[in-house]
Image (cartoon, rainbow, N blue to C red):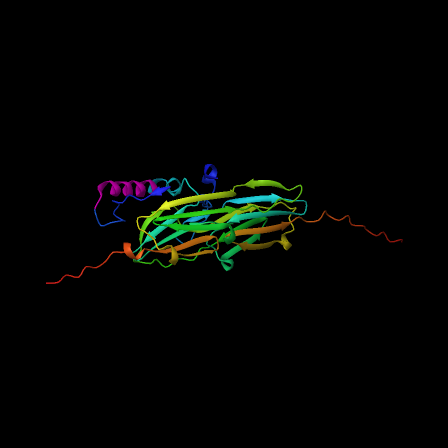
Amino acid sequence: MVRFNPGSPYATTRWDPFSELTHLQRTLSRAFDPRLARRSTEFPAVNVSANDSEVVLTAELPGVDPADLEITVQGAMVTIKGERRETPAAEGEQYHRRERDTGSFSRSLELPYDLDPDKVRATLKHGILNVVMPRAEADKPRKVSITS
Amino acid sequence: MNSRSNQIVNKEAQEPGRLERTRNRTVFSPGVDIRETKEELVVYADIPGVPDDKVDITVEKGVLTIRGSVPETEKSGAHSLLLEEFETGDYERAFTLSNEVDQENIRASVKNGVLVIHLPKAGPAKARKIEVSAS
């Protein structure tokens, strides 16, 4: 599970020198070994971005049928669960290369914001999952009007 | 699945020695399965994000080349990135084909980001009967 550092410069406006350093390190390691930096330990690899009103998660899920995919959102936690099926082998079939993995997977991420599970929209197109999760109304940043 | 997940992670395509790419974009070598039955070879390649019309398959001089380009997504400026584990880029990979493949009847389809190419085997060279005409 990935947990966002609540003090991260992305999550709040507070400056955190350690996450700045982590970010720098990541940038540098990517510069020297792009393959290493891109490697994720969990499947599927995800990209997550956010603004004031929503969090957007994208994941590469080639070969996963929408019917075999399940997304659950609870509080600030999003779980992607599914299965990548293999085309059944014909009789006497043999493999020359086998680089694509199959099987079931599950991954949970805790996001820095509470989400509104009723308004989550997900699409799976060309093997790319795109989940748009609006932030919970109560958790959104609010502008405070100042009275003189 | 996690233990082997590194295999799924995008691998950058090898730059052909004498060629340079015109687009300044990362190009990945898609992971493939190659399976053989009595009738055909089937290549499965993971090309997530490539629409059907952006897949380019060529067979030239016995080399099968798969190319797929992922359309640039407009960057939504207001979004800040929280986590970036994968990069998008184009896909490219080439294989040499043996003479066994019937290069005229190659079929391909894309479904859920997986390209499937059927390469039928050429029938056994038919014994040609040569008529001998009586003189």
Q: Quadrant for residue B33, please give it.
A: top right
B115 with respect to A59 (left or right): right
Q: Position of residue B112 (x, y in %)?
A: 51, 53
Residue that extends furthest to the left in the rendered view of this protein: A148
Bounds of the magenta span?
A15-30
The magenta stretch spans residue B125: no
Residue nearer the viewer, B55 or A50: A50
Q: Main secondary structure of the magenta part?
A: helix
Q: Position of residue A74 (x, y in %)?
A: 37, 50
Which residue is found at the position 38% from the left and 41% from the top? A1
A48 with respect to A60 (left or right): left
In the rendered image of this protein, does residue B49 appear above or below residue A39? below
Residue that extends furthest to the bottom in the rendered view of this protein: A148
Q: Quadrant of the C terminus of chain B?
A: bottom right
B22 with respect to B108 (left or right): left
Residue nearer the viewer, A10 or B107: A10
> Do we see residue B82 in this rendering?
yes
The magenta stretch spans residue A22: yes
Which residue is found at the position 55% from the left and 48% from the top? B44
Q: Position of residue B26 (x, y in %)?
A: 41, 49
Q: Quadrant for residue A117, please give it.
A: bottom left
